[in-house]
Amino acid sequence: MPDGPLSGRLEREIQFVLNHRVVALRAHPATPLLDAIRGTFGQKATKEGCREGDCGACTVLLGQLRDGQMAYRAVTSCLVPIGDVAGQHVVTVEGLQGTAQQPTPVQAALVAELGTQCGFCTPGIVMALTGFLLTAPHLKQDEATLALAGNICRCTGYAPILRAAAALVAQHQPLATATDRVPGLVATRALPGYFARIPQLLAELPPRVRLTQLPAGARVVAGATDLLVQGPHRLLDHEVALAGDLCGDAIEVVDGDLVIGAGATMEALSHHPLFLAFVPEMPQYARLIASQQIRERATLAGNIVNASPIGDFVILLLALGAHIRLQGPDGTREMPLDQFHTGYKRMDLRPREWLAAIRLPAGQRDKRVAFEKVSKRTHLDIASVNSALWIQVDGQRIVAARLAAGGVAPVPKFLSQTSEALRGKPLDNATVRLAGELARAEVTPISDVRGSALYKSRLLERQVFAHFQRLFAIEEGLP
Amino acid sequence: MKPQDPLLHVLGQSVYVDDLPEPAGMLHAAVFGSPIAHGLLRGLDVRQARAIPGVVAIVTAADVPGRNQIGGMVQDEPLLADGAVHFVGQPVACVVATSREAAHRGVAALTADIDELPGVFEPREAHRLGQLIIPSRTMARGDVDAALATAAVVVRGQTRTGSQEHLYLETQGALAVPEEGGRVRIVSSTQAPTAVQRAVAGVLGVGMHDVEVDVTRLGGGFGGKEDQATPWAALAGLAAWLLRAPVKLVLSREDDMRMTGKRHPYDADYAMGLTGDGDIVAWQVEFFQNAGASADLSPAVLERSLLHATASYGIANVRAIGHCCRTNLPPFTAFRGFGGPQAMFVMESALDHAARVLGVDRSVLQQRNLTRTGDVQPCGMPIRSDNAVRTFEQVISQFGFAAKQREIAAFNAANRRFKRGAALMPVCFGISFTTTFLNQASALVHVYTDGSIAVSTGAVEMGQGVNAKIQAAVAGVFGVADARVRLESTNTARAANTSPTAASSGADLNAAAAAQAARAIAERLKSHAAALLECPESAVALADGRVTAHGAATEWTFEKLAQAAYFARVSLSAQAHYATPGILFNRATESGVAFAYHVFGTALTEVTLDALLGTYTIDRVSCVHDVGTSLRRDIDRGQVEGGIVQGVGWMTMEEVVYRDGKLQSANLGTYKVPDILAAPALDVAWLEEPNAPSHVTGKAVGEPPLMYGIGAYFALLNAVRAAGVAADGMLEAPMTPERALLLLCGERP
Ligand SMILES: Cc1cc2nc3c(=O)[nH]c(=O)nc-3n(C[C@H](O)[C@H](O)[C@H](O)COP(=O)(O)OP(=O)(O)OC[C@H]3O[C@@H](n4cnc5c(N)ncnc54)[C@H](O)[C@@H]3O)c2cc1C
Ligand code: FES
Ligand code: FES
């Protein structure tokens, strides 16, 4: 367990349900759940492979009582601050209660197909597949694959894991349409019987505190998928405020505009019908962003305030013409997102202010939006360059356009000059070429591990071409 | 029924070093690595680190009681830097504290005073400067110069292959516990317990018998824990010894990536001479191996490159030259394939070059030149099989290569943005350690009076299934169910002077030794049974957990027999030693029979490229693999599938990036290995070989499949060319989306 010099004063009492029983500990709220599981509670089945959300070996299920029903999701426990776990149900491999005589169907399928070699990734795979059975909308093979996209296995080449998943999909089809899968999964022994009692256990735990102000000097911790990757020690010496206590996560229409609570997760937004009215292809794009485990935790606010020049949602939101609402001791103010980032990791955020909501003006709805992201690995990777184009056309003429790109400037970049130049232009190859040229001229990429400056510049141009091909079938830059 | 490893894994009950119950008073260690690639170490400021609550000690070179030296092949690797630093991440000090967090805070608070010296990072530059770890080596046959001079076609060029991070999911680690009488017991995540034992004994200045090393299992190794597990075990052992307390040292992922060596990057020059018909008549290749800052296993890796210089082809006139170049990067080390993949990439690149010049498909040249019985390898070892040709032909027929090529051509004609490509990749890989003396193993088998059986060998289980294979071999000898046989942890007190579990030979060697020991006991048991049953010994057999006489089951169960034999004072234990017969490689003459045998196979890789964005998918890899008469084809399939995906990763997305000696791709966020969505569909077929030479466990299968991955590079190259790009410059791997796009844009990076 971390024992930073200052952490004593900053510790809190935290209660949650670990597998079948209520547990309590005193800890700094930013302590990674993984450390509590392996350290404080001594349950070693959950493995540590990276501490950065990228391997999935630490995957556990996190269950929350929502409107009287349990909602589970698979998360990487190395990046979950223990403070966020208060009042929730954490399930590890131990909690599945499989035995050598009677392994769970997931465990049995992995053994039968030899989907485990060295075994170090295996607990994470078991949990991801169990999470799939519990939560996948249709229990289809491609959903299983996506559920496993956050789990690295260096030994098997994945083929036997996919075979195991296929067997599970076939076995569990009868459950696909059940509204509550818990009873069915208890019947197949994929879950132990105590799952039925969990809502009751959770209901007896103390409710979450609500914060109305950000305490002076406190850092906001949202999904922590960025903060804990930077290293817990950076947080453990500080007071923190959990975004879950501070901001809402509602996604709703207010006065015609779409207002997204800053605490909304990537996953929630990606499938929300109100957001799909702005970006119909969002579920496909979401596959390119992090992994399901991370999307279930990462918030939009974090994506904006971490000020990474290569965030994916921030680029989409820039193209969509989003506004952000900041709240602080002096009340609320609003600004266009494209004015927020002022330099590398600098932004217009005042002391004790936090990001409360994101607003998408009604007028932006039902236009065309394209998103492109290229990274070394297509999935679960940070982009070399990403970009989004929002565009409104009238027949063959561009009425308005907004192009934003990441990885090509010190900030997530709204390409104002290119966007402006597109206004009124005809939809033809010359315009597309011009857009590519202007975009390249407007950015200042640097060479780093994600690619050379030359590459990024070329890639941006090609992405601009790709946007027009996707939206208007204009072929440019092809052999 | 004893739960076997896979079952323990899925239940979460398998114990790795970091999962061991922590002994009372256990301390945690973390390592301070040099922040500078090359320099003189003037001093270390420990004041701030000492002040951190929980920090107990800061161990440096000055604290080493024995020799501050852990080099295996060459004694050129200090455990802790002394006077100079030679790569970023080189261990300088070890901070020991009451918690892992405190140990890491201690490391962060250390500062080293280093006078920076210029660093050398490129092997060609090191070669120019004469920075060689061993004298350059040449393996030659025939008359290359004459053959090149008279060849109808000669192609010359250069290639480059990048490094590769092992990314075993379990990072390096060890737990050291001081014991009575000055002993130390170390649980290490190592492929080479004996190497750890020897190094720790040397560092502590004690006998090897004072150090016990125990290994239950590894969360992956792939060669990365052959030599490179040693420093961490030695540091834990040293700290435990000095502080008289148990010490655990488990590297964080980032420390692991920064501090440990990976696959060797290679630069190469080649010249290939061919007849007008495409027969290769001359092959000259010069390897510039980036060995990193110390020898580690580099000379042996280079040796394997030389031995595989001709890859899967029969070539009469060959000259292969290898330079083992010392640079200021972490010592590069063993990685599945061990120099073979690098050599094969050069050969395939040259074939690609020749095919362009001759205007034929590369597969035509491949097929014409495949090695066959009667060919002689550069070292003088004859090839004793036609399996290269057989697997190649089987791939072509079984997976419809010709039809696929037509299909791809039609697809490419019809599509502007997406282009498909395919490539064949034959593999011929020699099995054995090229260092002859390593080809030995010992095993200790006990039969207990209840008929249960325990086996100790030098083999380390790391997911490759070696335990299951040994288990099956021993169970076969005793005619009992596999579950009656337990594989003990690999322990230097039970198996001494072991070879690392490497070179794909862990099962070959250790199962042979274990079977031999088992047979010794089985003979005694059978002779006792013969006496009991009053029948000739030759009529007695052990099968289905019973004694049979003249083929009929008797009332004697194996268990009953074991007990009876014990009461009759028959030894139920045996130790056996196995040495691979018939191999002898002479480094002085660079000749001999380097391998026990070769493993062959061929893969067909299909890819789709987005010619606009430079992104791609590796769609399918289909192979025919030569595994002989395997005891466990299910395990072999896993090795083939895993090897292919790892090889594809090396050739595509896995890019190790150093800048001025500092690793830029130092975490999983920046170093990408194939995930489930990137992994190709896999078709694994076996070469059925009627008269396969018998091996106890089938042919070695660990390394060869990795090299099928090379096909992905050339399939992508074909797809790039289908987009109308010549791609006739130097070939450099990996083919990242960046390289692909720059090729498509006609840019030279
Ligand atoms: C494995 C992995 C893969 C990833 N892949 C992607 C990817 O594909 N694309 C991508 O864009 N990102 C990716 N990320 C980065 C990260 O997930 C996102 O940036 C995410 O949106 C951060 O959100 P969070 O809620 O976790 O933020 P946190 O880590 O909690 O916080 C990030 C920053 O925002 C601040 N902050 C958070 N909420 C507020 C608020 N309401 N008010 C004020 N400040 C606030 C915090 O103080 C902190 O400075 C990945 C991360 C990981 C670990
Ligand atoms: S440890 Fe790798 S994702 Fe958590
Ligand atoms: S089995 Fe070793 S990492 Fe998956």
Image (cartoon, coloured by chain):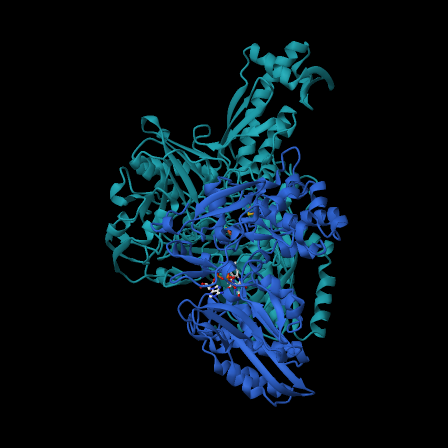
Chain colours: A blue, B cyan
Examine the rendering and report whether any part of residue B324 can be seen.
Answer: no
A421 displayed left or right of A468:
left
Q: Position of residue B50 (x, y in %)?
A: 27, 47
Total count of labels: 0
Q: Quadrant of the N terminus of chain A?
A: top left
Residues A428 and A412: in front is A412
Residues B453 and A255: in front is A255
Q: Farthest residue toward the right? A: A174
Quarter of the image where one finds residue A115: top right
Examine the rendering and report whether any part of residue A341 can be seen.
Answer: yes
Residues B273 and A172: in front is A172
Q: Vertical placement of B211 versus A358: above or below?
A: above
Q: Vertical placement of B65 versus B641: above or below?
A: above
Q: Position of residue A328 (x, y in %)?
A: 44, 69
Q: Quadrant of the C terminus of chain A?
A: bottom right
Residues A297 and A315: in front is A297
B671 displayed left or right of A161:
left
Quarter of the image where one finds residue B385: top right
Q: Position of residue A455 (x, y in %)?
A: 50, 73
Quarter of the image where one finds residue B382: top right
Q: Position of residue A345 (x, y in %)?
A: 42, 70
Q: Farthest residue toward the left? A: B42
